[in-house]
Image (cartoon, rainbow, N blue to C red):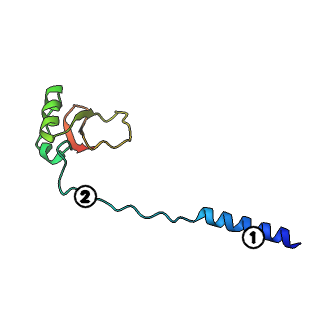
Amino acid sequence: MNFKTRLCLILGATLLAAGCSSTAEKPTSAAAPSGPTPDSCTSSAVEHFKGKTATPELLEQARQQAGASTARILTPDSVVTLEYNGQRLNLNVDDQRVITRVSCG
């Protein structure tokens, strides 16, 4: 192998290695909030609804008490999306629409 070919290979390898390295500084993280934000859901505020029959009126009352922006009733055969929404209240019910679980997300 001649000198020119070796030099090109070394330079190419050096450029490849340099492109794979990272010199960016790590971002500084801001202080995390200590409590729930004003628009966040607090499911513990509506635990007392367990055992009650879910109705549209009760759903709205629970949503307001939890501080959630949205709410939904989840039946055993409900198809739900998997994205997490910290401002959404979920009321899980059984086949008779009795609330068995409350959660946010």
Name the amino acid, label 1: Ile
Q: Can you tell which quarter of the image residue 28 is in?
A: bottom left
Q: Secondary structure at mark 1?
A: helix
Tell me where residue 20 appears, x and y as whole percent. 60, 63
Residue count near mark 2 (Cα–Cα under 10 Å), binned few <14, some 14–19, many ≥20:
few
The mark total stands at 2
Q: Is residue 76 visible?
A: yes
Q: Which residue is mark 1?
A: 10
Residue count near mark 1 (Cα–Cα under 10 Å), binned few <14, some 14–19, many ≥20:
few
Tell me where residue 46 appears, x and y as whole percent. 13, 42
Say whether residue 42 is left or right of residue 82: left
Instruction: Measure how far apart labels 2 and 1 are at the Cα level.
Output: 47 Å
Q: Which residue is mark 2?
A: 32
Tell me where residue 65 appears, x and y as whole percent. 12, 39
Say whether residue 3 is left or right of residue 41: right
Tell me where residue 84 appears, x and y as whole percent. 33, 44
State which quarter of the image contains the C terminus: top left
Q: Please report the residue visible at 16 percent of the width from the left and 30 percent of the height from the top.
A: 60
State whether residue 60 is above or below residue 51: above
State which quarter of the image contains the N terminus: bottom right
Q: Residue at the far right: name it.
A: 1
Q: Please report the residue visible at 42 percent of the width from the left and 64 percent of the height from the top.
A: 26
Say whether residue 81 is left or right of residue 65: right
Q: Secondary structure at mark 2?
A: loop
Q: Is residue 50 visible?
A: no
